[in-house]
């Protein structure tokens, strides 16, 4: 069976104090990171549970580098021990603060893919992505980016979209392009945060970025939301969980071994169990998890009648609320509809070309 398990080896602990972070109100477990016994159990279980010939380990946080370089060196040793002929991939999402030559030598040697969080130009980035002492982190992030490029480590950027940077889509795109970024993600800030951008503004930002990409960078730069919707227009199922018909195959393991249905649902009622007590494959096949994944297909009347249902499938269930709609409906609907309405003729033509 296919599923992915995102690991939080240092839990919600972070070395930044981003003002919009949804982990700020979560309790930090006293354990610094997964101990090696749990790490070995996780890696052995995960590899054995994947039927495919390739296995991808996703390391996120909090800030996953806080687990320490020795932790990942041990993780790679365990992966080699239990691979049994399978090809192992690793992807690390980081704020970049701790990256140095030693880290980059390791990441390069072991073929890690790195996701680097950067919210735009230094001024925009420093709006919210602050150090514990309240200073901006842009300079350190740019240093990390330069190191990744120097060591030729494949990386992409993740930009959190909030009300300070949402009006600057074109500028951010060109800034990242000037840094030779070839894969970009623009993720809207959600939840009860005063820093959130409006759906309309986010929709316009996606349109602005699409215009810049379409004008000069087709085949040169990948933008996640464009790539995902291009798949839909080609008649394929988007690979990103929020745009697929069902979900439930993107789980998370916390630093103490607890397994939850999804990174957006790390709440007691969505805990499936602990890998120390129950084999991972049993947790994945838990009927509770199967029901969780099918809930996404329960769309509002508005979604069922929408011409773009095939491209967004109602979005992430976590973003659906009753307020203003009469029944659960995605808060980003206006953004998606705006963007897809604008992009539709272009994506149709590109789909014909790629076919």
Image: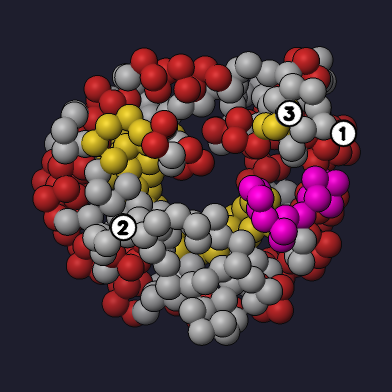
The answer to whether 208 appears left or right of 15 in the picture is right
Q: Residues within 10 Å of mark 3 (few under 14, many from 20)?
A: few
The quarter of the picture where residue 126 lies is bottom right
Q: Quadrant of the N terminus?
A: top left
Report the Cα–Cα distance between label 3 and label 2. 33 Å
Is residue 137 visible in the rendered image? The answer is no
Residue range highlighted in magenta: 189-203
Residue 198 colored magenta? yes
The answer to whether 342 appears left or right of 60 in the picture is right
| Upstream in sequence: badge 3 or badge 2 | 2
Q: Mark 1 highlights which residue?
A: 341
| Closer to viewer: mark 2 or mark 1 | 2
Instruction: Give whichever of 291, 65 is nearer the camera.
Output: 291
For numbered disc 3, what is the local secondary structure?
loop
User: In this figure, which colouring scheme has been used for the structure?
Assistant: secondary structure
The answer to whether 141 appears left or right of 122 in the picture is left
Q: Is residue 66 above or below residue 303?
A: below
Q: Is residue 154 above or below residue 218?
A: below
Q: Mark 2 highlights which residue?
A: 29
For numbered disc 2, what is the local secondary structure?
loop
Q: Mark 3 highlights which residue?
A: 322
């Amino acid at each position: 069976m296919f599923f992915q398990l995102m690991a939080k080896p240092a839990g919600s602990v972070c070395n930044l104090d981003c003002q919009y972070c949804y982990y700020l109100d979560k309790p930090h477990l006293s354990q610094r990171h997964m101990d090696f016994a749990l790490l070995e159990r996780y890696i052995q279980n995960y590899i054995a549970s994947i039927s495919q010939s390739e296995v991808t380990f996703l390391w996120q946080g909090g800030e996953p580098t806080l687990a320490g370089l020795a932790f990942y060196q041990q993780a790679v040793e365990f992966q080699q021990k239990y691979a049994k002929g399978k090809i192992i991939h690793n992807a690390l999402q980081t704020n970049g603060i701790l990256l140095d030559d030693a880290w980059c030598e390791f990441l390069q040697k072991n073929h890690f893919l790195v996701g680097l969080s950067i919210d735009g130009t230094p001024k925009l980035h420093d709006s919210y992505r602050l150090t514990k002492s309240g200073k901006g982190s842009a300079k350190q992030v740019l240093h990390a980016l330069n190191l990744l490029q120097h060591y030729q480590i494949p990386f992409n950027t993740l930009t959190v979209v909030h009300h300070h940077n949402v009006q600057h889509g074109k500028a951010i795109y060109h800034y990242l392009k000037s840094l030779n970024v070839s894969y970009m993600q623009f993720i809207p800030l959600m939840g009860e945060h005063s820093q959130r951008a409006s759906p309309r503004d986010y929709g316009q930002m996606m349109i602005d970025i699409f215009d810049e990409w379409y004008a000069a960078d087709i085949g040169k730069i990948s933008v996640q939301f464009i790539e995902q919707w291009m798949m839909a227009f080609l008649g394929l199922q988007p690979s990103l969980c929020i745009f697929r018909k069902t979900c439930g195959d993107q789980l998370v393991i916390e630093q103490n071994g607890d397994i939850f249905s999804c990174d957006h649902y790390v709440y007691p009622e969505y805990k499936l169990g602990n890998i120390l007590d129950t084999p991972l494959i049993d947790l994945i096949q838990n009927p509770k998890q199967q029901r969780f994944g099918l809930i996404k297909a329960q769309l509002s009347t508005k979604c069922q009648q929408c011409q773009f249902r095939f491209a967004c499938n109602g979005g992430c269930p976590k973003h659906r609320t009753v307020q203003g709609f009469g029944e659960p409906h995605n808060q980003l609907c206006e953004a998606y509809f705006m963007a897809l309405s604008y992009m539709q003729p272009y994506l149709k033509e590109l789909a014909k070309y790629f076919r």
